[in-house]
Amino acid sequence: MLARDTDLVTLSLADWLPDTVSAMGLRTFAIPLDLAPMGLGMAWHPRNSTDPGHSWFREHLAAAVLAPAGLGDAER
């Protein structure tokens, strides 16, 4: 919403939510630089390490971030 309603620029994953980007009237283009891959990580309070619900959420969040663009769990 900030990218749409202000003069700010945002970086995003390639082909991320193309229907939403189009509906919001945003324009996308490749970054004209050779950039090294960026590492992503997660952190949580140690008390949540063994919580089954928290573990489930972390696993699904990681899968969603690492999934190829446009492929949901049922399509892989």
Image: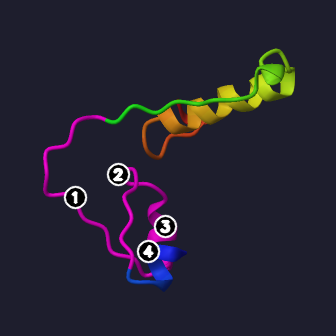
Is 63 situated left or right of 4 in this image? right
Q: Residue 40 at x, y = what percent?
A: 46, 33
Q: Are marks 2 and 1 in contact (CB under 8 Å)?
A: yes
Q: Tell me, for residue 64, which label it has, or none.
A: none
Residue under label 2, please give it.
Answer: 14
Secondary-structure class at tag 3 = helix
Q: Residue at x 44, y 74 (%)?
A: 22
Q: Residue at x 40, y 55 (%)?
A: 12
Q: Tell me, for residue 22, which label it has, or none.
A: 4
Sequence-first disc among 2 and 3: 2
User: Mark 2 and mark 4: span between their CA atoms?
Assistant: 14 Å
**20 inside magenta stretch:** yes
Residue segment shown in magenta: 8-37
Secondary-structure class at tag 2 = loop
Q: Are marks 4 and 3 in contact (CB under 8 Å)?
A: yes
Residue under label 1, please give it.
Answer: 30
Q: Amino acid at mark 4?
A: Ser
Q: Residue at x 20, y 43 (%)?
A: 35
67 above or below 28? above
Sequence-first disc among 2 and 1: 2
Q: Amino acid at mark 3?
A: Asp
User: Mark 3 and mark 1: span between their CA atoms?
Assistant: 18 Å
Q: In terms of secondary structure, what is the magenta stretch mainly?
A: loop
Secondary-structure class at tag 4 = helix
**Within-10-Å neighbours for mark 4: few <14, some 14–19, many 20+:** few
Sequence-first disc among 3 and 1: 3
Which tag is nearer the camera, tag 2 or tag 4? Answer: 2
